[in-house]
Amino acid sequence: MRGAKSAKWVAGAIIVALAATACGGSDSGSDDNGGKASAGSFDPNGKFSVEVGEPQNPLQPANTMESNGSIVVGALFQQLVDYDAAGKIVMVNAESVDTTDNKTYTVKLKKDWTFHDGTPVTAESYVKAWNWAANIKNNQTNSFWFSDIAGFADVHPDKGDPKKQEMSGLKVVDPTTFTIELSTPIPYFIYKLGYEVFSPLPESFYADPAAAGEKPVGNGPYKFVSWDHKKKIEVTAFADYKGPDKAKNGGVTFKNYTNLETAYEDLKSGNVDVLRQIAPKDLPVYRDDLGDRAVDKAYSAVQSIVPAFYTKQWKDIDPRVLQGLSRAIDRDTITKTVLQGTREPATGFVAKGVLGYQDNVGGDVFKYDPAAAKALIKAGGGVPGNKISIQFNADGGHKEWVEAVCGSITQATGVACTGDSKADFQADLDSRDAHEVKSMYRGGWVLDYPVNANFIRDLYGTKSDGNTSGFSSAKIDGLIKGADAAPSLDESVKLYQDAEKEMVNEMPAIPLWYYKVNAGYSEKVSGVDYAQDGDPILTSVQVKK
Amino acid sequence: MGRYVARRLLQMIPVFIGTTLLIFLMVYALPGDPVRALFGDKGADPATVANIRHDLGLDQPILVQYWHYLTGLLQGDFGTQIASRRPVTDVLADAFPVTIRLAALAFLIELVFGIGLGVMAGMRAGRLVDSAVLIFTLLMISVPVFVLGFIFKTVFAFQLGWTAPNVSDDVRWGELVMPAVVLAGLSLAYVARLTRTSIAENLRADYMRTAVAKGLPRRRVIGVHLMRNSMIPVVTFLGTDIGALMGGAIITEGLFNIHGVGGTIFESIQRREGTTLVGLVTVLVLVYLATSLIVDLLYAVLDPRIRYA
């Protein structure tokens, strides 16, 4: 099962593979072939296959949260902007996105973009799609992404029917221009626009949205062909695509696998070309099996253990106790042994690869030192009850590391620590939502957009949807507010960096490690690279003749 | 006979209602909300959750939900999946054909080899062949299915290269042979043992002596007199095993990447897809009810002393 990916629910926007990155990828991929790998050895119309699971939801851009669906939606739809590997904004469907006050954004579209059915992509295509997706009547799981836009409450009230059908913040100026007015200024709003939720929809979508979710018509590099449920989804390169990330291959087959072991066997016997993940069973051997085709790359996600601050135990805890527990965890050894090198010890709250990532922000707090750990816990008044537990879902492959972390804590500090296992991810979520976590729980976060705000504001703000621990700090909230009010993106990122530094003193969670992609690909393809959200970049894959 | 069948068919109605209600209540009792789970790790917007629950009727009392489900079922409507919004009938139509193929092939293997081995062993009870069959079946019973599957894959797919390790999307018959053997393995051993015991016992029965004394040819003695009487316990087992093959193939299906009933049941439990689960189980209950009726009717064919009014 794909349980191990439970932390990876929302895949963020796919990074545009700029020409430079893509070439770099294919060059390094064909190093061993020497001179043989000339440009002519690739088939621009060749198709390849990728391992996925069956998407849970219909393929509507604002309704696709889990990784199986979002990789397909990402191939079919393209948004206004995207970002490169360095976190810089790249205009894609937009000619320009301008703002003077971070509150009103003017979007100018590139002309002559079309949907796969031939109809033009206009300002109306965006405005209407967003209004539709935000409307509570349409039950889109990602509708809260539009909550920054003025008038969101009219179409998405907390209770009852929507008062209006349109958000007051969206206005069509002319066929290729529209404006977005936010309810409060957000300096990094343009980054959010790269997320799949902000895709445009063709007019044909509204006739029957459910049917459109089965046969999506997008504006992206790939065109939908067929969806054979639980077997495969086929897409083919869209010939009229105008974006910078035009497909270097003829199309993709998303092959459905029920478990990673079988997918890996199929990779070895040449029945599937690109994997997104290697099963734990095969991790020790996959480098030997695949050679240069083995992938080991960091992506922007972080795993933490989070105290449930609503419990008696952690209600008024001195942060030094949590710092002490953090210092009692031997991250280096655990990532190397138990996790077999698939993770990298964390040194802060913000994952690598996002704008504003600071190396080693936590300093000593993240370094293993039993003596210092004991001293800190003592200075903070000790762990209430002298025992903790870590809640996790048993279906996600978390048991081993939870036990290792517990062992490390107990050995270093004498604080008793046990794993608190819930049958599966849903039972785990239930317990978190109902505020029934006994002591701590495991938390995971994959980026939505590559700005540090995503790892700070969306997780640790008192009222953030992602804050399920009950953490609330007036100081952090104040810093977040200040960062959001910054006049420019750069200043906002800098203020968020300050907030992250402050978080080390407050310890809203104990970050453990950053995720890595451990995957591989077949001999048939090259130029396989993985984006910041951990998914393979499909358009840059080249198929050998 | 006709009255008996009619009575049995009528009895199916309460069994059917009881089982579906039980499954419904069991899924309801599990912790975890399928609608909340659509949002994953990230926080869910309560207004959207409430609205989706309302649209699906999940905010109503469980018995009301069950009533809606049952009345829908009578009109041939199995409901809608929560996450994908696909009709459950579509999901069933995807899953069952694959599993029926696999189960049919496994059943055939089980029937031919199980009974064959059993007859061989039973006819020569206590001799070398008998011991060999006993050891072989013991092995099949004691080795877990996933171990067997793994060994088969390693040997036949990776080392000998006779077949692909996994079943492709087209689900060709040739590809299904290996999973079917693995799936049939355990039941095959039971069938062989049941047949062997039954044959060994009946060899000494009075009617066998009579048949031999009448001077009937050996083929007729064994083929008609011995086999017919010895098959009664075996048929009972085979009948219930059809249901087990259809529903219990979770491990085998997962091992060979077959997208059939087993995997769908597992997934539906994980995602708390109540309607899908009840739909799958409903069909399986029907399969069980039908096969047990056929088994009972076969008794009368096999043993003329058994008569139904």
Image: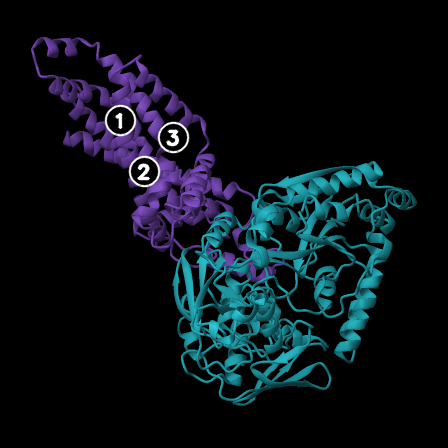
Chain colours: A cyan, B purple
Residue type highlighted by circle 3: Leu
As measured in the structure, the alpha-carbon distance from the residue carrying label 2 to the one carrying label 3 is 11 Å
Q: Which mark sits nearer the N-terminus, 1 or 2?
A: 2
Badge 2 is on which residue? B106
- The x, y position of residue B89, in whole percent, is 34, 53
- Which residue is at 56% across, 76% downward? A79
Question: Neighbour class for label 2 at 10 Å: few (<14), some, many (≥20)?
Answer: many
Q: What element carries label 2?
A: helix
Q: What element carries label 3?
A: helix
Picture mark count: 3
The C terminus of chain A lies in quadrant: bottom left
- The x, y position of residue A208, in whole percent, is 40, 71
As measured in the structure, the alpha-carbon distance from the residue carrying label 3 to the one carrying label 1 is 13 Å
Badge 3 is on which residue? B186
As measured in the structure, the alpha-carbon distance from the residue carrying label 1 to the one carrying label 2 is 14 Å
- Which residue is at 60% across, 64% downward? A530
Q: Which chain carries label 1?
A: B
The reply to whether residue A156 is in sight is no
Question: Neighbour class for label 3 at 10 Å: few (<14), some, many (≥20)?
Answer: many
Name the mark on residue B115.
1
Q: Is residue A514 above or below residue A215?
A: above
Q: Residue B205 vs residue A118: left or right?
A: left
Q: Residue A34 vs residue A370: left or right?
A: left
The reply to whether residue B149 is in sight is yes
Mark 3–mark 1 contact, CB under 8 Å?
A: no
Residue type highlighted by circle 2: Ala
Residue type highlighted by circle 1: Ile
